[in-house]
Image (cartoon, helix red, strand yellow):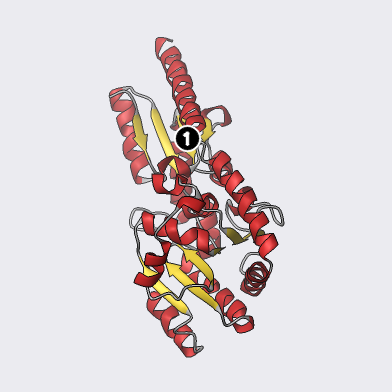
Amino acid sequence: ISVVHATDPYYGGGVGLCLKIFCGKPLVISVWGNYDDLYSENGLLAMPRLFRWRFLEKICERIIFFSANLVVGGNWDIVRFVLNNGARKHETVMLPTSIHMHKCHFTDPCRRVGWEKVFSKFDIPLNQSYLLCIGRVILEKHADDALKAMKVAIDQDPSIIGIFAGEGSMRKELEDLAASWGLKDKIKFIGNVDQETISKLIPKCIVLSPLTGMALIEAGLGGASIVAYDRDWQSDFIVNDVNGFIVKYRDYKEMGKKALQLVQNHELRSKFSLEILETALAYSDLDKIFKNQQDAYEKMFAKFDTRAQR
């Protein structure tokens, strides 16, 4: 064993800290979510079966983050979270989640062939305007807001088709709601699909992102115009009116209006598409990410060896 690596500051982090002490090896904690934000917005604990109260999770966070030899945040919002909860600045690094992205998303959007078969497979009519929401169809991701935003746009332009790519506890509820609005044929729920399918859908769609993680980078690499809430890390990735639209958190009406604006304004949509592709490519430069990762680990090992010698 050269290093102990945990992917959360609670159960995994606790086990990791024990192994660090037992084995005398450095501890790395990777964090992929802002748990303070999750709790403040939804009252949800990170691991409710492990801790019944948030204050216990907070104590655990501070112990684990402070004890770690390296803390890795998946975006700058997460880095701010870990620094606010005990991580040391000089032992914290941001490595984008795109390091784990499927290679199909790095294909030039113009070279992604076979999208017609994908649309046909899910009974999605061709030559329409499409609003796509990628992610789990759950309350925490505000999938209901995406559906309401789609309705706002479709009410003004019936040629628009809404698409949900993902599965979750709210799917049946949202399907029934769309049907009650008379939009059963206008909103397509395609469930969980593979990454190749997602990569072929994205370039043909405007992406609605109430709250999205790595899929937001995938949307950028696909050159999709994006309308996103000002929530979590999304405004770090999207600059309003430059490479997409950022709207006020939970303002689904404005999200729908901005999506409609992109449907109607092809020049603006093309501008956003080029700008977000450039942003995503810079954010997903794997050579740079791997170099930063290697540098962070080498720096960590050097510090750890120095401390051990003392």
Q: Position of residue 135 (x, y in %)?
A: 44, 62
Q: Position of residue 90 (x, y in %)?
A: 56, 27
Name above or below for residue 56 compared with residue 182: above
Using the rendered view, name the quadrant where residue 245 is placed: bottom right
* Residue 122 relative to residue 289: left or right: left
Name above or below for residue 10 compared with residue 129: above
User: In this view of the protein, which residue sits in the foreground, 237 or 187?
Assistant: 187
Using the rendered view, name the quadrant where residue 231 is placed: bottom right
Residue 111 appears in the picture as rendered? yes
User: In this view of the protein, which residue sits in the foreground, 285 or 12?
Assistant: 285
- Secondary structure state at the residue bearing disc 1: helix
In the orientation shown, which residue stands out farthest toward the right?
Answer: 241
Name above or below for residue 12 compared with residue 124: above
* Residue 103 relative to residue 152: left or right: left
Q: Position of residue 34 (x, y in %)?
A: 51, 50
Residue in the image at 48% along x and 81% along y = 186
Residue in the image at 52% along x and 36% along y = 285
- Residue density around tag 1, few if under 14, some if 14–19, many if 20 or more, within 10 Å: some
The quarter of the picture where the N terminus appears is top left
User: In this view of the protein, which residue sits in the foreground, 180 or 109?
Assistant: 109
Q: Amino acid at mark 1?
A: Leu
Residue identifier under label 1? 286
Residue 45 appears in the picture as rendered? no
Number of marks: 1
The quarter of the picture where the C terminus appears is top left
Residue in the image at 34% along x and 28% along y = 20
